[in-house]
Each structure stands twice: as C-alpha cells, then as structure tokens.
Amino acid sequence: MSSPNSPSQNPISLTPQGPPTTVIPLEDPAIRHELSQALAVAAESRREAVAVVVSNHPRSLISWANIGDLGRDNLERYAYYRIGYHRGLDTLRQNGWRGSGYVRWNQESNHGFLRCLLGLHKMAEAIGESDEAERCHLFLLQLDPSGIPNDEFPATQS
C-alpha cells in the first residue's frame, strides 16, 4: 500500500493552460541592428563580421545562432551552437524557467535559443553524437510540441 504522500496518490496539478511558458526578453535593438549589418556584408566576410558581434555581445543568443550557421565545418558549428545553447539555459533561468515548461517558437525573442538547440541537435547528428542528438530532439519537442520550422536551419555542411 502506498503512503498518502506517494506520487501515485498526489498527482501534480497543472493549470488549464498546461505547463508555464517562459519568454526570453527581446534582444537590444542596437545588437540586432549590429547583427543585421554584419549579416549584410559580402559572403566571404560575413563569418568574421558576425564573430565581431558575438565578441562584443557574448550573451546575444541570436548572434550565437548566426555564427553557428556560418561555421566553417560541422565541428565548429557544433561548438558555436553548444555555447549558445548553454548561454540560453542561463538566460531562461534568469527569466523564471525552472527546468520545465514551454519555450515557444511563436515568440520571436525565443528564436536565438531555439535555433542554437536545433543547431546543436543537427550538428550532434552530423558528427555522430547520436545520444546527444536524441536528447536535443526530445528537449525541442518538450519546449515547443508544435515544432520549429525546418527552414530555420541551414543545410548541413560537410
């Protein structure tokens, strides 16, 4: 017989809306402008221009996502996305996230973190880290069951 405090006797109640949703604040317009300027330079200089933005604003999740997109190979892209993902976890915690609940794609300000997590998933697959790829995939589904649009991720580089 289970005790009155066992999980089977006292289920966790959720609000009618389900788990809480965390929204990361929109990044500073000056940083977004600086990033858009860097992304507008000639293709051969774009990675270096975005790297300057990341160096100037190392907490900018959207900048980490973009430098990940511009990595020279899958391993470099993996590293950039991983940094952005961990910075994103810190940012989520600073904004009330307690390890569970939604972080939805329909909030533009969540895009940097979710793109880093998606990139980490794709690059983990590409470099043969199948356990990590599966964890990232599951985490993405938990954060936003409606999914992240596939066109938000550039094609895997070789």
Image: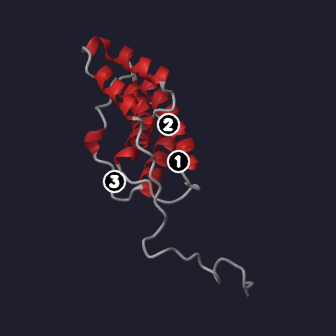
Q: Which mark is residue 92?
A: 1
Q: Amino acid at mark 1?
A: Leu
Q: Check the image and report above or below for 124 versus 51.
A: below
Q: Which mark is residue 48?
A: none
Q: Which mark is residue 129?
A: 2
Please tell me which residue is depicted at 42% across the width and 26% down the height of the picture: 77
Residue 101 drawn at (x, y percent): 50, 60
Q: Secondary structure at mark 1?
A: helix
Mark 2: give few (<14), some (14-19) or many (20+) Cα within 10 Å.
Answer: few
Of the pair 102 and 119, the residue shown nearer to us: 102
* CA neighbours of label 1 inside 10 A, class few (<14), some (14 to 19), many (20+): many
Q: CA distance from mark 2 to mark 3?
A: 22 Å
Along the polypeptide, which appears first: circle 1 or circle 2?
1
Please state which amino acid type lies under the numbered disc 3: Gly
Q: Nearer the viewer, mark 1 or mark 2?
A: 1
Who comes first in sequence, dot 2 or dot 3? 2
Report if the CB atoms under discs 1 and 3 are less than 8 Å apart.
no
Residue 50, quarter of picture? top left
Distance from the alpha carbon under mark 1 to that under mark 2: 25 Å
Position of the C terminus, as image quadrant, is top left
Q: Quadrant of residue 146?
A: bottom left
Image side of residue 7 versus residue 88, left or right: right
Residue at 45% x, 24% y: name it. Answer: 54
User: Which circle, 1 or 3, is nearer the viewer?
Assistant: 1
Q: Residues within 10 Å of mark 3 (few under 14, many from 20)?
A: few
What secondary structure is marked by label 3? loop
Left-right relation of 15 to 115: right
Q: Which residue bears the numbered disc 3? A: 147
Q: In what element is the residue under mark 2?
A: loop
For the residues labelled 2 and 3, say whether their Cβ atoms are less than 8 Å apart.
Answer: no
Q: Residue 109 location, x and y as percent?
A: 39, 45
